Image (cartoon, helix red, strand yellow):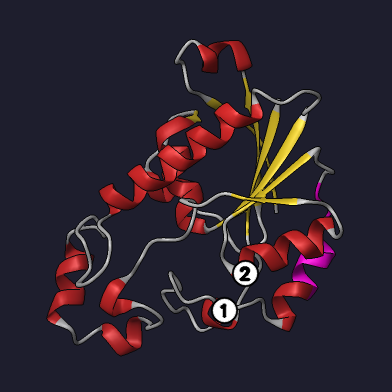
């Protein structure tokens, strides 16, 4: 089975380099235009984060196809840093501590990277287990968030890479190969085959 992990298209907050986590904003016109300039493979099964920017991306790319919502794949909760950018946060001691810690600690009122990654990895593994019970799925696509992709790939990706090394721009996608027998045995590996840029 092949799995496409697609980062949603650009939003107004992405353009302004804001931390867009729980803010449920839609795609910008620029984001829609950029998605339409790329070619994405067709899929037999379409999954999305519940967030509007992912659902709108799924509609642009696979209009009319049924979308299966997967709770747990939402972006990180940035707490007090939500929808702010570096310029607005650079003088905050709490933000500086978070940066100095490599973004691992919980933001005030938000998630730590460990808690966020565990949530995403658990939801993704459950999604794959569900896919493997269905017949005739040769390629599934999951429209999710940049942080979600980094968390999933750090846990399951091959070759092994650190969290930030799996960073994708808006609209980019990873084409992954899932060895079904190995996954069922507990060898949960997603082999990176290609990147759609």
- Examine the rendering and report whether any part of residue 126 can be seen: yes
On the image, the x and y values in percent for residue 129 come to 56, 27
| Residue hosting label 2 | 53
Q: Main secondary structure of the magenta part?
A: helix
Q: Is residue 168 above or below residue 83?
A: above
Q: Tell me, for residue 75, which label it has, or none.
A: none
Q: Callout 2: helix, strand or loop?
A: helix
- Residue at (27, 84) in percent of width and height: 89
- Residue at 71 percent across and 25 percent down: it is 1
Q: Position of residue 87 (x, y in %)?
A: 34, 87
Residue range corresponding to the magenta coloring:
33-40
- Residue that label 1 marks: 25
Say whether marks 2 and 1 touch (CB < 8 Å): yes
Q: Residues within 10 Å of mark 1 (few under 14, many from 20)?
A: some
Whether residue 191 is visible = no
For residue 66, side relative to residue 193 (left or right): right
């Amino acid at each position: 089975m092949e799995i496409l992990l697609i980062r949603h298209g650009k939003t107004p907050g992405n353009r302004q380099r804001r931390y867009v986590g729980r803010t449920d904003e839609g795609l910008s016109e620029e984001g829609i235009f950029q998605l339409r300039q790329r070619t994405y493979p067709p899929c037999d099964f379409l999954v999305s984060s519940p967030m509007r920017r992912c659902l709108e991306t799924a509609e642009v790319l696979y209009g009319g196809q049924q979308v299966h919502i997967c709770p747990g794949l939402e972006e990180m909760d940035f707490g007090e840093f939500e929808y702010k950018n570096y310029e607005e946060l650079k003088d905050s001691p709490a933000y500086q501590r978070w940066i100095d810690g490599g973004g691992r600690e919980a933001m005030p009122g938000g998630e730590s990277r460990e808690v966020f990654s565990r949530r995403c990895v658990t939801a993704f593994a459950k999604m794959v287990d569900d896919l493997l019970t269905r017949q005739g799925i040769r390629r599934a696509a999951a429209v999710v968030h940049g942080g979600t992709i980094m968390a999933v790939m750090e846990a399951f990706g091959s070759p092994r890479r650190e969290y930030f090394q799996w960073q994708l721009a808006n609209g980019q996608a990873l084409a992954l190969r899932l060895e079904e027998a190995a996954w069922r045995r507990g060898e949960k590996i997603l082999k990176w085959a290609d990147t759609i840029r």
